[in-house]
Image (cartoon, rainbow, N blue to C red):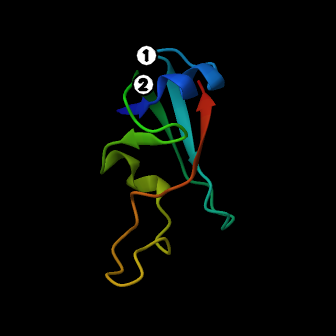
Amino acid sequence: MIVMMNRADMARLGVQDGEMVTLESDAEDNHHRSISGLRVVPYNVPPSCLAGYFPELNVLIPLEHHALDSHVPAGKSVPVRVRRG
């Protein structure tokens, strides 16, 4: 139950290594999707990107958010908000 974040993003958001956060999906479809209890881990991911594991983070992906040709869930590009606590 971790979320890997770029150190610069951690500083910008004011979160520390090991702090617990909630991720909220930003699919703009009027459905609330979130997961709490994720521990922040600094990791070498590009700025403004996060990384996490599945199936834990599947709850953030709208069913309508899928690849155009294969129709598999598009888990590599899910906009989220980070909330402390």
Image quadrant containing the C terminus: top right
Disc tally is: 2
Task: Residue type at mark 1: give it.
Answer: Gly
User: Which residue is more in the foreground, 18 or 13?
Assistant: 13
- The reply to whether dot 2 and dot 1 touch (C-beta < 8 Å) is yes
Q: Identify which residue is drawn at 59% across, 19% down.
A: 11
Q: Secondary structure at mark 1?
A: loop
Which label's residue is closer to the chain start, 2 or 1?
Answer: 1
Quadrant in which the N terminus appears: top left
Determine the secondary structure under disc 2: strand
Residue appearing at x 42%, y 82% in the figure: 68
Separation (CA) of disc 2 from disc 1: 5 Å
The mark found on residue 27 in the picture is none
Q: Position of residue 34 (x, y in %)?
A: 54, 46
Numbered badge on residue 18: 1
The residue that appears at 44% across and 24% down in the rendered structure is: 40
Residue occupied by mark 2: 39
Residue situated furthest bottom in the rendering:
69
Q: Nearer the viewer, residue 66 or 38?
A: 66
